[in-house]
Image (cartoon, rainbow, N blue to C red):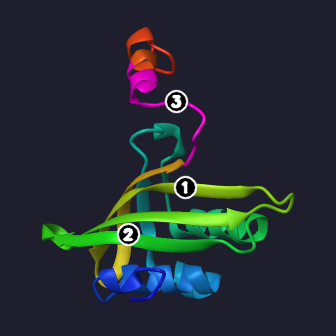
């Protein structure tokens, strides 16, 4: 098995996109997205966007800021309507030597041989906020939630 886990993905644009990202081949990667691609980020709605131009902008910054960035696919499944569910993570080293890690789920929609949309759930991996009891206590106290 490839260390990237890419073989877990179905043949097609999602697999090609991950492969291109791991090669840092920006043009090949962006070519897998529809021009009207829609990224919905439910946990951070202000981060949602539309268009492959923003995909290019985002990944240009990621490749520049994390020159050894790599993606790993931990699991994947396909569903109706061109859906590809991908549990994945990434890791990269910032210029100051600190390591950036994120993990989450992307639910991608493939249409016409291109990635047309995604519901994107990716968060930084952190180990300082405490265990499950601390997380439940934080949720009950209302830290970080929406205001009416």
Residue at mark 3 to residue at mark 1: CA–CA distance: 17 Å
Residue at image location 38% in from the left, 74% down from the top: 115
Among the two numbered marks 2 and 1 on one chain, the one whose residue lies closer to the N terminus: 2
Residue at image location 40% in from the left, 30% down from the top: 132
Q: Quadrant of residue 62?
A: bottom right
Q: Position of residue 83 (x, y in %)?
A: 23, 68
Instruction: Please give the label number shown on residue 114.
Output: none
Task: Say few, some or many: other residues with alpha carbon within 10 Å of mark 3 (under 14 / 14 to 19 / 20 or more).
Answer: few
Task: Say few, some or many: other residues with alpha carbon within 10 Å of mark 2 (under 14 / 14 to 19 / 20 or more).
Answer: some
Residue 146 appears in the figure? no
**Residue at label 3?**
130
Report the front residue among 142 and 42. 142
| SS of the residue under disc 3 | loop
Residue at mark 2 to residue at mark 1: CA–CA distance: 13 Å
**Residue at label 1?**
102
Among the two numbered marks 2 and 3 on one chain, the one whose residue lies closer to the N terminus: 2
Among the two numbered marks 3 and 1 on one chain, the one whose residue lies closer to the N terminus: 1
Residue at image location 28% in from the left, 76% down from the top: 111
Report the front residue among 46 and 97. 97
Span of residues in magenta: 125-136
Task: Say few, some or many: other residues with alpha carbon within 10 Å of mark 1 (under 14 / 14 to 19 / 20 or more).
Answer: some
Instruction: Please give the label number shown on residue 74.
Output: 2
Residue 94 among magenta residues = no
Residue 135 among magenta residues = yes
Q: Position of residue 45 (x, y in %)?
A: 46, 39
| SS of the residue under disc 2 | strand
Q: Quadrant of residue 9?
A: bottom left
| SS of the residue under disc 1 | strand
Q: Are marks 2 and 1 in contact (CB under 8 Å)?
A: no
Task: Please tell me whether residue 141 is drawn above or below residue 135 in the rendered image.
Answer: above
């Amino acid at each position: 098995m490839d260390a990237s886990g890419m073989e877990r993905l179905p043949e097609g644009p999602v697999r090609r996109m991950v492969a291109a990202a791991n090669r840092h081949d920006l043009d090949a990667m962006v070519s897998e997205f529809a021009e009207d691609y829609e990224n919905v980020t439910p946990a951070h709605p202000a981060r949602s966007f539309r268009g492959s131009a923003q995909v290019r902008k985002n990944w240009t910054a990621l490749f520049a800021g994390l020159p050894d960035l790599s993606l790993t696919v931990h699991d994947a499944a396909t569903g109706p309507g061109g859906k590809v569910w991908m549990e994945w993570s990434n890791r990269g080293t910032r210029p100051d030597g600190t390591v950036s890690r994120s993990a989450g789920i992307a639910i991608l929609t493939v249409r016409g041989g291109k990635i047309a949309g995604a519901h994107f759930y990716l968060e930084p991996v952190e180990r300082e906020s405490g265990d499950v009891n601390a997380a439940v206590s934080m949720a009950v106290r209302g830290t970080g939630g929406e205001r009416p």
